[in-house]
Image: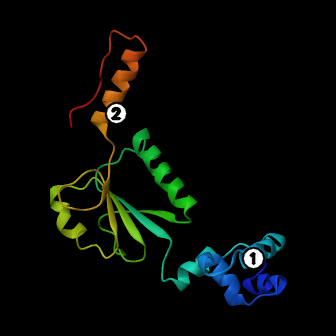
Amino acid sequence: MPTLNDVAKLANVSKMTVSRVINHPEQVTEELRELVHRAMVELDYRPNKVAKALAQNRTLIVKVMILEEMDTTDPYFMNLLIGIASELDKNHYALQLITQDSINKTECDGYIIMGMRENDYEWIKEMPKPVVLFGENDYGVTYVDSDNVGGTVKATNFAIERGYDKITFVGIDV
């Protein structure tokens, strides 16, 4: 496996220059970037994400906590987890499922929490890492959510534009 040193030797530059090209490309000239990138391609060099995370005191782990009952046969949860895992993977992060009672709440870079209830806010605001809630909240905690009303309007308009004259909405009252 080629090293940073191997790339530096082939490109005839210092290891610091290779590091700058990888981590701060705006700090080097276009000519140096091209020279180093050619050496990286020739050697099939890929920066070690784990080493970089270690140097930056990161874990590359996002903990996902599901506070509500989860039915593993429900495709909603499985699709949701697969979507989260896929996006994390694209960014070189791993997903770790945990429970509210997990002892180790620190060895990660952040949390995605689903199913927060009123009484969960107190301990969630004390979490030692960044938190994103899945679902809207009134506590000022960062969240992601889907626009169910907007989605219903779009689906209805789509059906009307296609000439449907009988439209039925089937949903549940939670």
Please tell me the numbered disc located at residue 31.
1
**Left or right of 11: which side holds 89?**
left
Closer to us: 104 or 92: 92
**Which SS class for mark 2?**
helix
Residue 53 drawn at (x, y percent): 54, 78
Residue 55's place in the image compared with 101, above or below, is below
What residue is pinned by disc 2?
Answer: 151
Closer to us: 110 or 157: 157
Please tell me the numbered disc located at residue 77.
none
Where, quadrant-wise, is the N terminus in this rendering? bottom right
Could you give the CA–CA distance between mark 1 and mark 2, rounded to whole angstroms? 49 Å
**Left or right of 24: which side holds 171?**
left
Which of the marked residues, 1 or 2, is nearer the chain's N terminus? 1
Residue 39's place in the image compared with 140, above or below, is below
**Left or right of 2: which side holds 61?**
left
Q: Are marks 1 and 2 in contact (CB under 8 Å)?
A: no
The residue carrying pointer 1 sits among few (fewer than 14), some (14 to 19) or many (20 or more) residues within 10 Å by Cα, namely: few
Which residue: 39% across, 18% down? 159
**Which amino acid does the dot numbered 1 rest on?**
Glu
Say which quarter of the image contains residue 100.
bottom left
Residue 46 in view of the camera:
yes
Which residue: 21% across, 33% down? 173
Closer to us: 16 or 73: 16
Residue 12's place in the image compared with 42, above or below, is below
Residue 128 drawn at (x, y percent): 31, 76
Where, quadrant-wise, is the C terminus in this rendering? top left
Residue 18's place in the image compared with 169, above or below, is below
